[in-house]
Image (cartoon, rainbow, N blue to C red):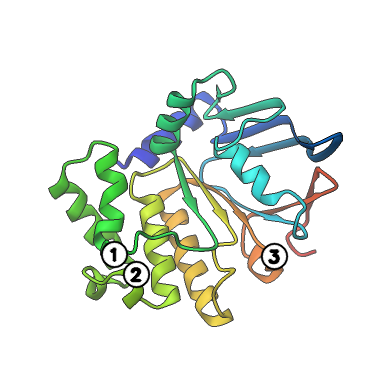
Amino acid sequence: MTLAAEAAARSEAIGAPALELRGVRRVFRQGGVSLVVLDGIDLVLRAGEIVALVGPSGAGKSTMLHVAGLLERPDDGLVLIQGRDCGSLSDDHRTLLRRRALGFVYQFHHLLPEFSALENVMLPQMIAGVAKSAARDKGAALLDRVGLAGRLGHRPARLSGGEQQRVAIVRALANDPLLLLADEPTGNLDHLTGEAVMGTLIEIVRSTGLAALIATHNLELARRLDRIVAIEDGRLFEWPVNN
């Protein structure tokens, strides 16, 4: 059983969601002006569930993902990962939890240009303490799964946009996270390539049973997921999938 499956099983056993946000507020201040970006956000995301996060540019989708991913601290409210309140954790403990339980995919792939596709997938494993040979074997298997077995030694500059994003997805999943957070993962791709990349992402998430929160402007894509939540004026609303 993978670490993600074990974490999902533990989460289900104790009845704790993979992610829970309770009354989360995030306020940005500049001079004497306060901008409330998140105004009492509540969200429950369980293992095996894929949720789309939609909303106009500047509505706070990225901020919400940063708070959920422990990259930013909320000004108020609770962030719970598998039932654990992360608010009192030190920065070092938050970093460790991100490394072990969270995976991130961004609009731009952020691959390290001087390393090959395989090395980009090996690095987060080795940082987490996995032996080099084991990281290499797992990385190769994951890249093969997304159709990149023939690109293991290629650096990012020699990969297409879709291939680069597939490597980024695999890298995010290399440490078997409990929760995947994706911020416009197909935003820099053309329609057909984006559809293929999202299909890969959904297939992997479904098969591993982890939880995923995917921010997107693509409503067609959002309707393929389990639920849609929309952020507007700092508040979160549930949308019907067929809206």
Residue 24 appears in which quarter of the rendering?
top right
Q: Is residue 243 above or below residue 178?
A: below
- Nearer mark to the viewer, of 2 and 3: 2
Read off the residue under disc 3: 217
Image quadrant where one finds the C terminus: bottom right
Residue 109 occupies quadrant: bottom left
Which label number is shown at residue 147? none
**Extreme residue toward the front, this view:** 31
Label 1 secondary element: helix
Q: Are marks 2 and 1 in contact (CB under 8 Å)?
A: yes
Give the crowd class for mark 2: few <14, some 14-19, many >=20 residues within 10 Å. many
| Residue 156, disc | 2
Given this view, does label 2 or label 1 mark the residue nearer the observer?
Answer: 2
Q: Quadrant of the N terminus?
A: top left
What amino acid type is highlighted by mark number 2? Answer: Pro
Please name the residue shown 77% across and 57% down the image.
240
Indicate the position of residue 184 as horizontal and vertical percent values.
Answer: 60, 61
Asked whether 139 or 220 is in front, the reply is 139
Q: Residue at x 54, y 81 (%)?
A: 192
* Image mark for residue 117: 1
Residue 198 to residue 52: above or below: below
For the residue pair 11 and 54, the one nearer the viewer reads as 54
> What residue is shown at x 62% (from left), y 30% (from top)?
73
Q: Is residue 125 above or below residue 203?
A: above
The amino acid beneath tag 3 is His
Instruction: Tell me how far mark 1 sits from mark 3, CA to CA.
Output: 28 Å
